[in-house]
Amino acid sequence: MDNRLKAKVISLFNEPACAKNVAKGKKERRKGCGKPLTPGATAGGCAFDGSKIVLQPITDVIHIVHGPLACEGNGWDNRQSASSGSTLYRNGITTDLTQMDIIMGTGEKRLYKAIRNAAERFNPPAIFVYVTCVPALIGDDVEAVCKHAAQKLNIPVIPVNSPGFIGTKNLGNKLAGETLFDHVIGTMEPEQSSDTDINIIGEYNLSGELWQIKPLFDQLGIRVHSCITGDARYRDVASAHRSRVNMMVCSAALINLARKMEEKWRIPFFEGSFYGIEETSRSLRKIAELLVKGGAAADLIDRTEALIEAEEKRCWERLEPYRQRLQGKRVFLYTGGVKSWSIVSALQQTGIEIVGTSVRKSTETDKEKIKKLMGSDAHMIEKIPPRDIYNRLKAGEADIMLSGGRTQFIALKAKIPWVDINQERHKAYAGYSGILALVQDIDCALSNPVWQEVRQPAPWEEGWEAPEIDDLFDDDHLFNERAS
Ligand code: SF4
């Protein structure tokens, strides 16, 4: 790891805005936030993957992965981060380094060629270049190539120095934030700006969740100047320093960016969520309050309250039939981070009982929020092997599991319904309309008749005798089987 990157990583392990980090001793802090891996367990995404997740939703730029083909194949477009315009970001472009490049030292040349080709072919407003393990280990000077290409081609070429081996996906998220702070934000001025402009940080517009909340802001005359990054445009991110408020949706990922923007451009930030009625209303209130404090017209607060009242009323009316059906249903929640409490809050409001929520990737603040929501008997699960989840589900502790795609098979094996709530999902669950969609999906999964079917004993388990082998070739037998 080169010295500059080393210094950057050490500085990220020293985050004054993160309570968990501040509470650690000096020695503990130097180890970072990643937990040592259990041999045999999957490692999750690498730091490169983490950076790509954050930056790829800048939709009108080209993202070039400098490394072997598999690095790009590993993470390309595996989340449903949607765009309302340009689709340039969905091109998977890599320098495809091979052994020959390593032996001959041609990686830098290959990278420059790739940048030039992309600039000529797509004419993007900027190009992001991701450093992966191989070029970092062989010492390709990616920053120098980017600088040279930017001068020659006259467009911003931004190095993302976050090779996989330096750490976890979360560290990569933070390094992406550093990249934006060092190379992008503050480099352009917005075409228009107002005292009600905001940025949303850590919202990736998965399956279009940003579009569920944007109409609320439109009604209030609040402009989401830049979403960092979901359905984002380069110019908007580059001029995000002119916004008046930063709302941080996922604090664990980009708290360093929000804190630095506050220090440099005096943009106040807060952490909020758009999952659930209460959280959505709370976030809208907080944004209005901070905007008015920053100089927006005072009537914004009253208009926000009126909108919240109308939206909540409409939402509760639409939820009522489901509330009656789902009252007392028990959910096992296996997710992490901000979702570990925001989904709890959203579900509790609909009368659903949470029998357990995992807090593997949750911060201390997330855990505090869960305790506040669920009371002293909060069933927080730090670490649970798949076998134990299966045993709990099989024993009938929950009626449904909400988790990511990787754990769906545990629920399916235990023959209980499952709904995807992780980043790969195809449904959007944000804002007032999102909670309705989530509750509808839970209701659909619970009332699907297939569960009754699969819970019946299989024919060979009970009261069924295998036909004699000769019978199987008997025409009458076959005819009778088909007819029945
Ligand atoms: S760990 Fe390194 S080699 Fe593997 S995907 Fe990440 S950047 Fe590529």
Image (cartoon, helix red, strand yellow):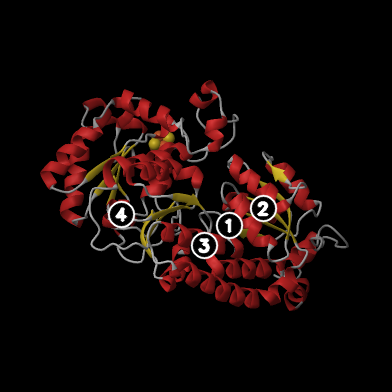
| Type of amino acid under label 2 | Leu
What crowding class fits label 3: few (fewer than 14 Cα within 10 Å), some (14-19), or many (20 or more)? Answer: some
Mark 2 Cβ and ligand 1 under 8 Å apart: no
Helix, strand or loop at mark 1: loop
The residue most toward the right is 463
Q: Which residue is mark 3?
A: 285
Q: Earlier in the sequence, mark 1 or mark 3?
A: 3
Q: Which residue is mark 2?
A: 333
Q: Disc 4 to disc 1, how far (Cα)?
A: 34 Å
Q: Earlier in the sequence, mark 2 or mark 4?
A: 4
What crowding class fits label 1: few (fewer than 14 Cα within 10 Å), some (14-19), or many (20 or more)? Answer: many
| Type of amino acid under label 3 | Arg
Q: Earlier in the sequence, mark 4 or mark 3?
A: 4
Q: Are marks 1 and 3 in contact (CB under 8 Å)?
A: no
Q: Disc 4 to disc 3, how far (Cα)?
A: 21 Å
Q: Is residue 167 left or right of residue 67?
A: right
Q: Which residue is mark 4?
A: 242
